Amino acid sequence: MHLIPTCLAPYYSSHPLNQIPHIATLTPLAVGALASACTILIHSIPLNGTVSAVRRERRMGRAGVGFWSDFAIVALSISYALLAHLFEIAVWALVFLLVGEFHDFGIAYYHCAVNYTTLGYGDIIMSPSWRLLGPLEAANGILIFGVSTAMIFAVIVRLTQEQFADLRG
């Protein structure tokens, strides 16, 4: 199925930017699934740490006591999540290095940060062999950011319920 109108086909087919190369599928999907599994594992560590920290602060009577103690708990939760995201971007960068897409960690890390956060500058284009890793990384990043958001929201709800008895459900 062609998406180019027949009358414009001669222009598009001769224009070098419109040449669509074969995009590899199975190998990048397998590699992307493995990288995603690693990021999920990495992200479980700060999630567990956040739950433990909130439980500890609650046992010690510091959760829901006041603004500054709650601020510290939320800031710690956000810091755990951010640190995990930075490591997860590094995992993707290492994947790109291992498959030979990049030869410099800094460039790979930058590219992966742009993909993982779904910022999508598009200033670095991958080869057709590994191009599918870009959207896989973006999907992984947005889902993991959703997990972080949910955890931080849960912490805030818990702290609010601790502070205000009428909000306990």
Image (tube, rainbow, N blue to C red):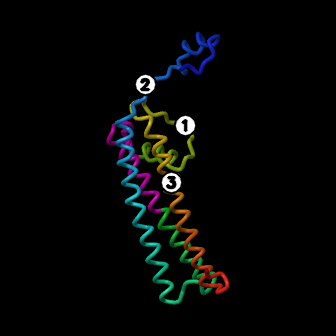
**What whole-number distance in Å separates the C-alpha atoms at marks 3 and 2?**
28 Å
Q: Look at mark 3 in the image and give the residue it sits on.
A: 143
Residue drawn 58% across and 68% down?
Answer: 153
Q: What residue type is labelled 3?
A: Leu
- Which residue does the numbered mark 1 point to in the structure image? 122
Q: Main secondary structure of the magenta part?
A: helix
Give the magenta-colored segment's residue range. 83-105
Q: x, y (%) of residue 132?
A: 44, 36
Hey, what amino acid is under mark 2? His
Point out the tag, 2 or 1, that comes first from the N-terminus: 2
Q: In which quarter of the image is residue 120?
A: top right
How many residues crowd mark 3 within 10 Å: few (<14), some (14–19), many (20+)?
Answer: some
Residue at image mark 2: 22
- Where's residue 162, x and y in %? 59, 84
Q: Is residue 47 above or below residue 65?
A: above
Magenta span contains residue 56: no
Foreground mark, 2 or 1, reads 2
As helix, strand or loop, the secondary structure at mark 2 comes to: loop
